[in-house]
Image: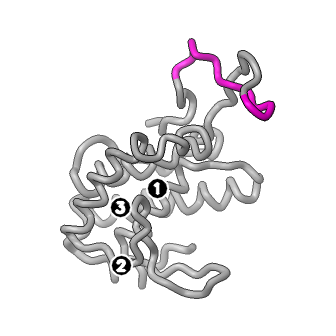
Amino acid sequence: MEVTEVLVARIPVGNLRVPRAEFVSVWTTAERLAREAGEQRVLAWYPAGVTATCRWLAGAVVEDRFGRRPAESPVTWRSVRAFEELIEAEYLAAELLDVRRPYLLEQQPGWSEGIRATLRWAWRRQGPPPLTSSAEVASVVPAPQAAVDSGPRGRARPDPARPPHSGYAPRS
């Protein structure tokens, strides 16, 4: 999705607690990283989480194989435009996402973190922006973890001595 002036002008004022220009910079970077990752055939869940959250906060209309529709909330998948009370509820749900859906940690590494980082920054004004404009795909894609032994169905289990999710935290 291209972040246009028309989209930016339609962002509801109450949906952001950071300067609009900073939000647009993060959103544009997330869209660029998601596009580049797709072109490189790399799964980049962190920028995808940031992108999904920005689209929802901005009230964007997305187009996919099902047609045009409002962007869904990134955690609860509500197809309702974001407004202040709903953003707060989504933030609280995002904080519990890894507990409620632990499979996301392995199957979509970075997705939950991207959502949380975006909502903490844009809504709660806590922490740094989730992405910087100079971010590259390699800096947001998780590094492969060394396999210790095979798990069920031949899947490798990560090394327990290595901290989870190392290698894809946004770099300043």
Mark with earlier residue (2, 3): 3
**Relative to 55, 160 lies left or right:** right
- Residue 156, magenta (yes or no): yes
Circle 2 — which element?
Answer: loop
**Residue 58, position in %: x, y?**
36, 73
Looking at the image, which residue is at 55% across and 42% down?
A: 103
Q: Disc 2 and disc 3: Cα gap in Å?
A: 21 Å
The x, y position of residue 100, in whole percent, is 41, 46
| Mark 1 or 2, closer to the camera | 2
Q: Answer few, some or many: residues within 10 Å of disc 2's Cα (few below 14, many 20 plus, some between 14 and 19).
A: some
Q: Which mark is residue 50?
A: 1
State the mark number for residue 23: 3
Earlier sequence position, callout 1 versus callout 2: 1
**Above or below, 13 relative to 113:** below
Kindly indicate the quadrant of the structure image that contains residue 82: bottom left
Please state the horizontal and vertical placement of residue 67, each as a whole percent of the image.
Answer: 60, 87
Amino acid at dot 2: Val
Depth order, front residue of 105/87: 105
Task: Name the foreground residue: 81 vs 76.
Answer: 76
SS class of the residue under badge 1? helix
Element type where label 3 sits in the image: helix
* Marks 2 and 3 in Cβ contact (< 8 Å): no
Instruction: Give the magenta part as a residue range.
Output: 152-163
